[in-house]
Image (cartoon, rainbow, N blue to C red):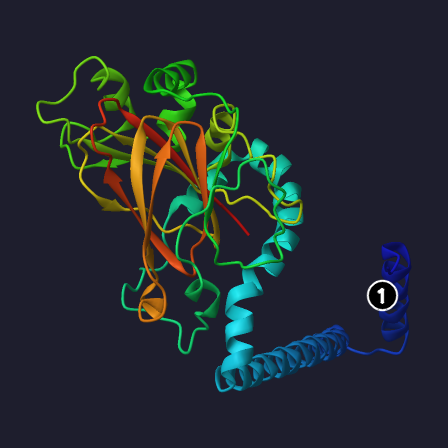
């Protein structure tokens, strides 16, 4: 950095020299202006060179990415491999960045509001071209693997259930949790969806309690979506991470709680962010029908399982589109929890 005192001294010396040689002050000022102009041009050239280098590198990376995309798209085996496993490799790495973001989000919680906005509309007609459906082709039923060691490197399309001594989560538990942390839930996850117009926000669920005031036909269905960190942490107190979850799986921020009266009609379970999905029945019971994904409907068959309290259903979203149906002779409210892992 130039010393301003030296700069001032040199300027005074130049002006003194010009005075001794009878050089007009206007000429001296003109020389100074020309020097400043040269310095300005030199700085612009450096910035231009730097911008040009950045543009060239960006263009090169873009061209290489497009080339790799074209090659993989025209080579079905490579495309299928990437589509099945890309999330499983990406999200564990992203888990590190999510942990780095936690202190920032604690200081500026309003940032998470942007994550709750949908940037893209889901295309219901999208299908993966030439998807390999062989993994689900051999699935004819949904086995109960309670008490067994699970090898996660086997058939990724194999759905299964597990029963364990997890705590039962009832409608009262949900209401108590909401009442204890009402401000957090109202601010960060207050909206719900329902087939009953009386329920539009989560406060309606706690006020017009279905366990105390059931509807005449007992057909109300409510989906409560959580997509922010604070309510997600609170929900883990009721629905902790399953113990058998692999260490390399990262849990999605998005979570769903489904509340169903005994005769709540059939509905498709929400699409999850990650492909490895866990559906847990906290209380009550529901029939879950696993329908093959549109790409695999010609090769794979549907399976149905009765999911009861303290049971979990594990499935892969790439191969299955679950439908929740009312269980025969059910008399109690069903509480279901859905989360996913990448």
Corner quadrant of residue 300: bottom left
How many labels, in total?
1
* Viewer-side residue, 57 vs 6: 57
* Viewer-side residue, 308 vs 252: 308
* Viewer-side residue, 266 vs 213: 266
Corner quadrant of residue 195: top left
Q: Is residue 73 above or below residue 165?
A: below
Q: Is residue 226 left or right of residue 333?
A: right
Q: Which residue is mark 1?
A: 11
- Residue 11 position, x and y percent, is 85, 65
Q: Is residue 129 left or right of residue 34?
A: left
Q: Is residue 156 above or below residue 202?
A: below
Residue at horizontal 42 percent and vertical 78 percent from the top? 130
* Viewer-side residue, 40 vs 28: 40
Residue at horizontal 53 percent and vertical 80 percent from the top? 77
- Residue 47 position, x and y percent, is 68, 75
Q: Is residue 186 above or below residue 54?
A: above
Secondary structure state at the residue bearing disc 1: helix
- Residue 238 position, x and y percent, is 47, 24
Q: Is residue 214 left or right of residue 102?
A: left
Identity of the residue furthest to the left in this view: 216
Is the N terminus in the top left, top right, bottom left or bottom right quadrant? bottom right
């Amino acid at each position: 950095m130039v010393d301003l005192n030296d700069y001032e001294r040199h300027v005074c010396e130049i002006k003194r020299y010009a005075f001794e040689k009878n050089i007009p002050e206007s000429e001296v000022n003109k020389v100074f202006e020309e020097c400043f102009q040269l310095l300005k041009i030199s700085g612009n050239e450096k910035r231009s060179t730097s911008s040009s280098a950045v543009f060239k590198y960006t263009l090169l990376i873009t061209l290489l990415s497009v080339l790799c995309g074209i090659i993989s798209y025209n080579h079905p085996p490579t495309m299928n491999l990437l589509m099945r496993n890309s999330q499983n490799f990406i999200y564990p790495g992203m888990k590190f960045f999510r942990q780095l973001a936690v202190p920032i989000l604690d200081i500026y919680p309003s940032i998470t509001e942007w994550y709750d906005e949908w940037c893209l509309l889901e295309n219901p007609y999208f299908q993966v071209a030439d998807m390999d459906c062989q993994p689900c082709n051999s699935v004819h039923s949904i086995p109960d693997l309670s008490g067994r060691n699970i090898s996660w490197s086997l058939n990724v399309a194999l759905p299964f259930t597990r029963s364990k001594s997890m705590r039962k989560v009832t409608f009262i538990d949900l209401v108590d949790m909401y009442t204890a942390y009402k401000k957090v839930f109202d601010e960060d996850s207050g909206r719900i969806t329902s087939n009953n117009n009386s329920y539009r926000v989560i406060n309606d669920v706690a006020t017009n309690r279905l366990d105390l005031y059931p509807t005449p036909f007992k057909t109300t269905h409510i989906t409560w979506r959580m997509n922010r960190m604070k309510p997600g942490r609170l929900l883990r107190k009721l629905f902790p991470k399953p113990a058998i979850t692999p260490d390399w799986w990262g849990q999605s921020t998005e979570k769903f709680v489904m509340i169903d009266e005994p005769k709540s009609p059939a509905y498709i379970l929400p699409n999850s962010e990650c492909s490895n999905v866990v559906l847990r029945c906290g209380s009550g019971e529901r029939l879950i029908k696993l329908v093959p994904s549109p790409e695999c409907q010609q090769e794979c068959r549907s399976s149905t399982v009765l999911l009861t309290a303290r049971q979990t259903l594990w499935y892969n979203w790439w191969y299955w589109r679950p439908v929740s149906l009312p269980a025969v002779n059910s008399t109690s409210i069903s509480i279901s929890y859905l989360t996913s892992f990448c």
